[in-house]
Amino acid sequence: MFGNYKEIVKISRSSFAISHNTTQILLIPEKIFIKLLETREEIKILLYHQLLINVNKLGHKFEVLNFESANKRFVSYLIRMSDIYNSTIINATVEEIGQNISTTRQTIHKMIKTLTEINLIEKKYSKIRILDKEKLITLRDNLN
């Protein structure tokens, strides 16, 4: 979601984006946008949620810059997504996860297989279910 978050963060902003997929953009005049924020709590929640997702994606990019292993980035991704969505089920394809943590599909498949074998997760289609989040957190904390 791109746009003017001025009313949320109290700083004027503009955005520039390049889309990798077909995208539709809805331009909302500022006065109408402000009125929506004032009168529709669900709009404000949606914007906060999208902002949280964008910050999360940046966190993953910083993990890559910090040279953390692909294993640690994957486990961290699962934990972070679980926290954001308050769910033990992560809806993401192997391709999406690979893009988010900057690693290959093959590496993701190997990690899924390993975590499945030790009963920390199970995978079905594009869903990964965390079976033991506490053990997953312990594993993350012990990975390089």
Image: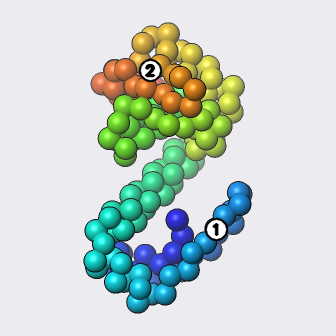
Q: Which mark is residue 121?
A: 2
Which mark is drawn over residue 24?
1
Q: Is residue 43 above or below residue 29?
A: above
Q: Is residue 107 above or below residue 77?
A: above
Image location of residue 44, percent across then percent down? 34, 68
Q: Residue at x 51, y 51 (%)?
A: 57
SS at badge 1: loop
73 or 86: nearer the viewer: 86
Is residue 111 depicted above or below 13 in this figure?
above
Q: Residue furthest bottom?
A: 31
Q: CA distance from mark 1 to mark 2?
A: 36 Å
- Give the x, y percent position of residue 61: 55, 49
Please state which amino acid type lies under the numbered disc 2. Answer: Ile
- Which residue is drawn at the image coordinates 41% and 85% (left, top)? 32
Q: Vertical placement of 9 versus 116: above or below?
A: below
Question: How many marks overall?
Answer: 2
Q: Secondary structure at mark 2?
A: strand
> Percent from the top left, x then y, of residue 22?
71, 60
